[in-house]
Amino acid sequence: MPSGRRGLRVMSVLNLRPRKLGSFEEYTIWLSRTLARRGGQSILVFKDSPPDALRPHYTEAGAELETKPVEPFGLDSARALGALLRKHQPDVVHLHFINMLSLDVAAAALHRGAKVVFSEHSSDIPKERSALRWALHRASKRAFSLGIDRVITPSNYVNARVVSQGVSARKVTTVYNGVNVESFRNASTAEDVRAKYGIAGDRVIVASISQLIPEKGIGYLIDAAAAALREGRSVSFIHVGDGPRGEEYREKVRRLGIEKHFIFAGLLNLWQIGDILRQSDVFTLPCTWGEAFSLVILEAMAAGKPVIVTRAGGNTEAVEDGKNGLVVPPHDARALAAAIVALHDSPERRRAMGSESATRSAYFSVERWVDETIGVYESLM
């Protein structure tokens, strides 16, 4: 950056209702702290104000906090963003979890003096479209992306998808997600997970973290858990997260008679998740959709665990079959059960894959994620 120039003022517009301290929340905190250290300013704009327990994490990092409504085609949403842009006069406005086909994108593009960065975080659910509707969708994406200076994608999978939808490849760059590697690898354990959940010391713990929605493959995981237990394997499962299908999945676990060995831990903060990951033996995320690129996989890798994923989306850009985990087909409980059984039966293989995960996780750090993101901002100035 030229000598004498003030640091970057970055407004991050986040279509989020923060409920806990997770790895994405930590990214925004780390970004705010890094900008402040470089003489800049972070303005975080949320859909709803963070809870009291989270606010100090943001403010102590130097962030200014704002809220505004977020509606894809709501004039109030666009007007609120315009007012915030006039108030704060940022150099960069960075849109997260916003629909590209929205008036917020148009409002950001119309604000003179601010570069517009758009992060495409969404996973892919295949949709049936006629040739005409597909052409219209591509034309719309192309038109709305004209006002965006740079599109950031979390994986090459999403990069290719965005370009296929009509966004100019020259505007799209991949910046992989990251996590606080040290906190998952070396933090002291606050809670004995086996004692808390009544898991015997000789049982292999398989952890999973996600919303309780069908696209995360939790139904298949429950079926795979039942199959592994029927085969006589000493396995216990801990799932972290909540969601709209929670009661349905709990009922399925009860119906299969495995509730003693399939535990729903609910929504947890990072330090609690770290305790579970460090004390687990295997991690799995058996998505059925084209997952963009999962932060929880990076958390498990940082904790030094072998990871079982499905061949769907960008997660295989972090997990290599047979190296630091196993890759199975989506929608296949039998294949998932076989992978769980294989790792249960071979402690040496678990250790080797976990060691490889820990080595690979060094690249996927939150520091690198923030530095590369700021590098994108600076390249536009």
Image: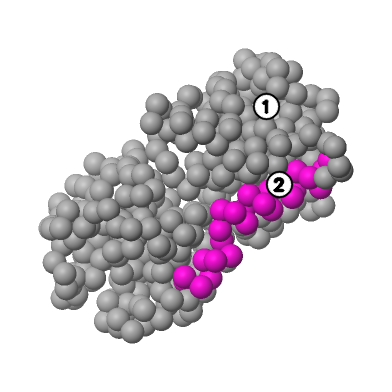
Of the residues tagged 1 and 2, which is closer to the observer?
2
User: Which colour style is shown?
Assistant: one colour
67 lies left or right of 90: left
Residue in the image at 79% along x and 40% along y: 149
367 lies left or right of 146: left
Q: Secondary structure at mark 1?
A: helix
Q: Is residue 220 above or below residue 211?
A: below
Prevalent SS, magenta region: helix
Q: Is residue 55 above or below residue 260?
A: above
**108 is within the stretch colored magenta:** no
Q: Which residues are magenta?
A: 357-381
Pinpoint residue 337: horizontal percent, then vertical percent. Answer: 30, 71
223 lies left or right of 1: left
Disc 1/disc 2 C-alpha distance (Å):
22 Å
Residue in the image at 41% along x and 59% along y: 184
Q: Secondary structure at mark 2?
A: helix
Upstream in the sequence, badge 1 or badge 2?
1
